[in-house]
Image (cartoon, rainbow, N blue to C red):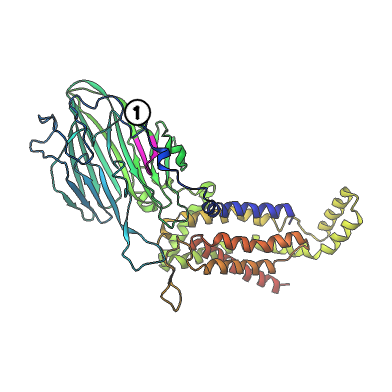
């Protein structure tokens, strides 16, 4: 294999696997100072209130404080409505526990019952459930409605009738209805919950006392959705627009506010494992996004909607608050599986994840399932690996002849190339035979890397929970790194053994590069998710066994 090819492959692998750890270590991913993204009064943005009035008698109020009621019950209000200030309505389902404020129906909490926030270093303390809107209520209003770009939860008198606690069992649905007097208009929000999915459906009805054009917006706000020890600590704004998936994770860009236009399938905030998204029912909604005060906010808006006194305006929106697990995403009214972005090699990654789930249905242990998947991939790649190894053996055998040719024709490059090609032909050796199979395998390796990195099923999936013969927590979560660095060190050792067993061409520079790779990869893998390290470790062990078998066939 040529030096340049070897160096190119090494550099590609370093960029692929080393960029995230390096950028974390160097501090290139530091969060911006909240003050630098603080929105100034009057600056346009999805949280800014413009000068257009919400209603003739609208009375501004604090988000959860007392507000002045305009007086008369407006059209569309229930006859026995009650003031909603201070009320907290809890919706309890088998999948989540959601809390809403009676003022505006905004989301105060959304806890996922099946998923917890816990590190692998200490499992003695009770684990808190994942709350997708934790830390947002003081700065934003998750699930808030915007009327004429104003906060309806602040600038209206709200009412709510019904129980303050709603419990749903399997196959059950239930709705909450909130009413607001906006002065010249009334607003009715009806949010429906399905106990079997993470999807929330909302219907909005606006009634106006006078003919007017209004702007209607739905918003979703979250703080950082990444866990404290996630390998990729990135929360981003993502969307599918015009059939194409796009994402934005740069906080300075989002701090300036972004508008993405219409024709959206879905849009929202997400991390590797969780998603808070909106799915508009038609392509007429546009999407705005902003990062401000450590909060990611996305709004779906529609402007200049005509509302007549005799014709109420009806609108709807679908929400998803939950894990990026394929079966859950498929239950949504839009194709949310596109939120799992495997990159260029998605066509390979998705079948690999499906195989991983298939193996786990039998093994019941994702560590064992990764081992089975690794062995299957290595068996499929056996012919390529076999040819690569045979080619390198052939190149090693003709090294003495090649050296003589270099000395004999060192001043005649054209003649040297001709003689070397004749040498390859005589010994039936393809000079690219040792390199081409490796290059062809790279897409599969990268696809496996992506598959294991983004597979939600590996989050908190246990392999060997405790270090053998101790009470020390070890591979209890395959999405986290090995706390004792045992698997990365073993991976580096097996990589070194594999390199020593691989035939060399006699080129000292190439030999040094190849022996240096195990050291580099060991340091890179120290903070990798342990599921990835297990895959690479088993792959190395299988390659060593294959090389030993081929040596015995000589």
Residue sitting at 86 percent across and 62 percent down? Answer: 401
Residue 89 is one of the magenta-drawn residues: no
Q: Name the outermost residue toward the front.
A: 35
Number of marks:
1
- The percent coordinates of residue 93 (x first, y second) are 24, 54
Q: Is residue 172 visible?
A: no
From the image, give the main secondary structure of the stretch colored magenta: strand
Relative to 254, say whether 51 is above or below.
Answer: above
Q: Nearer the viewer, residue 402 or 215?
A: 215
Q: In which quarter of the image is residue 77?
A: top left
The answer to whether 417 appears left or right of 148 in the picture is right
- The percent coordinates of residue 52 (x first, y second) are 28, 24
Residue sitting at 31 percent across and 59 percent down? Answer: 128
Q: Quadrant of residue 140?
A: top left
The answer to whether 151 appears left or right of 429 in the picture is left
- The percent coordinates of residue 440 (x first, y second) are 63, 53
Query: What residue sits right under mark 1 in the picture?
Result: 42
Segment tinted magenta in the rendering: 288-299
Residue 291 is one of the magenta-drawn residues: yes
């Amino acid at each position: 294999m040529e030096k340049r090819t070897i160096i190119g492959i090494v550099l590609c692998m370093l960029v692929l696997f080393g960029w995230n750890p390096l950028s974390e270590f160097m501090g290139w991913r530091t969060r911006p100072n909240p003050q630098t993204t603080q929105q100034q009064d009057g600056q346009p943005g999805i949280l800014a209130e413009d000068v257009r009035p919400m209603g003739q008698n609208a009375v501004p109020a604090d988000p959860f404080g007392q507000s002045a009621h305009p007086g008369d019950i407006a059209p569309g209000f229930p006859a026995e409505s009650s003031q909603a200030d201070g009320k907290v309505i809890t919706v309890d389902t088998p999948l989540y526990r959601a809390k809403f404020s009676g003022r505006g129906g905004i989301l105060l909490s959304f806890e996922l019952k099946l998923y917890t926030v816990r590190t692998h270093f200490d499992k003695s303390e009770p684990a808190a459930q994942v709350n997708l809107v934790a830390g947002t209520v003081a700065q934003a209003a998750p699930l808030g409605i915007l009327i004429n770009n104003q906060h309806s939860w602040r600038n209206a008198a709200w009412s709510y009738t019904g129980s303050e606690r709603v419990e749903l069992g399997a196959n059950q649905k239930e709705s909450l209805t909130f009413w607001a007097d906006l002065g010249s208009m009334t607003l009715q929000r009806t949010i429906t919950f399905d106990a079997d999915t993470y999807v929330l459906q909302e219907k909005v009805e606006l009634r106006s006392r006078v003919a007017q054009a209004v702007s209607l917006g739905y918003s979703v706000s979250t703080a950082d959705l990444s866990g404290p020890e996630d390998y990729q600590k990135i929360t981003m704004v993502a969307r599918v627009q015009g059939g194409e998936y796009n994402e934005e994770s740069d906080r300075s860009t989002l701090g300036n506010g972004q508008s993405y236009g219409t024709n959206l399938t879905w849009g929202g905030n997400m991390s590797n494992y969780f998603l808070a998204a909106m799915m508009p029912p038609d392509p007429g909604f546009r999407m705005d996004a902003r990062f401000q005060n450590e909060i990611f906010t996305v709004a779906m808006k529609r402007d200049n909607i005509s509302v007549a006194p005799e014709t109420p305006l009806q609108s709807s929106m679908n929400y998803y608050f939950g894990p990026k697990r394929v079966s859950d995403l498929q239950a949504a009214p839009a194709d949310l599986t596109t939120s799992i972005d495997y990159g260029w090699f998605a066509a390979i990654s998705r079948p690999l994840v499906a195989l991983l789930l298939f193996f786990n249905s039998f093994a019941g242990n994702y560590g064992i399932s990764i081992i089975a998947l690794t062995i299957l991939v290595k068996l499929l790649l056996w012919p390529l690996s076999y040819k690569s190894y045979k080619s390198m053996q052939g190149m090693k055998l003709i090294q003495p002849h090649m050296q003589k040719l270099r000395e004999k024709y060192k001043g005649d490059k054209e003649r040297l190339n001709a003689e070397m090609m004749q040498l390859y032909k005589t010994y039936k050796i393809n000079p690219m035979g040792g390199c081409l199979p490796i290059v062809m395998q790279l897409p599969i390796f990268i696809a496996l890397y992506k598959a294991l990195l983004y597979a939600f099923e590996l989050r908190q999936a246990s392999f060997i929970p405790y270090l053998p013969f101790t009470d020390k927590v070890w591979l209890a979560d395959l999405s986290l790194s090995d706390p004792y660095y045992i698997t990365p060190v073993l991976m580096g050792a097996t990589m070194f053994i594999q390199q020593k067993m691989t035939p060399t061409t006699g080129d000292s520079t190439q030999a040094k590069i190849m022996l240096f790779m195990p050291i580099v990869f060991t340091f890179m893998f120290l903070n990798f998710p342990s599921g990835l390290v297990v895959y690479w470790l088993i792959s190395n062990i299988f390659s060593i066994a294959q090389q030993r078998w081929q040596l015995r066939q000589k």
